[in-house]
Amino acid sequence: MTTLLERHVQGGAPRLVGPLDVLREARRRFLRSQRLDMRELAADLASSRPTLYRWVGDRERLLGEVLWSLAEPALADARAYADTHASNAGVDWVVQLYLHLARMTATFEPIRRFVETEREAALRVLTSRHGVQQRRLIDALRKILEEKSVAGDLELRLDPAELAYVIVRIAESFIWHDFITREEADVVKSADVVRALLS
C-alpha cells in the first residue's frame, strides 16, 4: 500500500501543509543528526500524529524516504563519476558507479551517526527488503544494468533484478557489518566482488 507521501512525491496535488513538508522537515533534522521524533515533528508542523502517520506511514518508513531523497542525487553523482573514471562503458563503468556510491554512503556523517545512535532501527531502514531505501536502490540498479545490457556494453549472466539485489546486499554486508564491528568498511574489496560477478 502506498502512503500519501509517496503519491505526493510522484506528483500529487500539494496541501497547505502536507506530506512533502513532513519529508522536508524530517530530512532537515536527519542532516543535522537530530533524532526524528514523530510527536515533535507533528507539533512543529502544526499537525497531529495520526495525520502524520496517515501521510507518511510510521517513523521507519519516513526515515526510508529521507534516505532515498539523499540516495537519488548520490546516484546521479555516481553516474557522473563513472562517466569520467571508468576505463570502459560496461563492467568498469558499473564498478566505478558502485565504488563511488559505496564510498559516499560509508563516509556520509548523518548516516554514520544514525547507525551509531540507533543501530537496530538504522539497519532495518537501510537493509530491509520491505523498506523504501533498499527496494528503490535495487530497482534503480536494475534499470542501470538493463540500460547497459541493451546498449551492448554489458553481458549479464544473471537476471538484472537478481543481480541488482545481490550487488546491493554485497554493499550492505561490507559497509554495515564493518561499521558494526568498528572496522573501516572495505569498499574496494566489495567492488572487487561486484567486478567478479559482472565479468
Image (cartoon, rainbow, N blue to C red):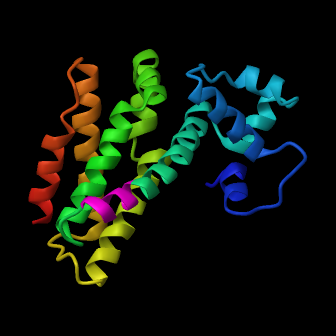
Q: Is residue 134 left or right of residue 158?
A: right
Point out residue 195 in the picture as x, y percentages from the top left corner.
Answer: 13, 57
Point out residue 104 in the picture as x, y percentages from the top left corner.
Answer: 37, 40
Point out residue 116 in the picture as x, y percentages from the top left corner.
Answer: 40, 18
Q: In which quarter of the image is residue 162?
A: bottom left
Q: Is residue 116 above or below residue 47?
A: above
Q: Nearer the viewer, residue 90 or 64?
A: 90
Which segment did they paint magenta? 78-85
Label the magenta part by its dominant secondary structure. Answer: helix
Point out residue 125 in the picture as x, y percentages from the top left corner.
Answer: 46, 36
The outermost residue toward the front is 84
Q: Is residue 92 left or right of residue 15?
A: left
Q: Is residue 33 left or right of residue 77?
A: right
Residue under the point 23% across and 37% down: 173
Q: In this view, does 175 lie above or below 88?
A: above
Q: In which quarter of the image is residue 47?
A: top right
Q: Is residue 109 visible?
A: yes
Which quarter shows the C terminus?
Answer: bottom left
Residue under the point 51% across and 52% down: 73
Q: Is residue 130 visible?
A: no
Q: Nearer the viewer, residue 110 or 3?
A: 110
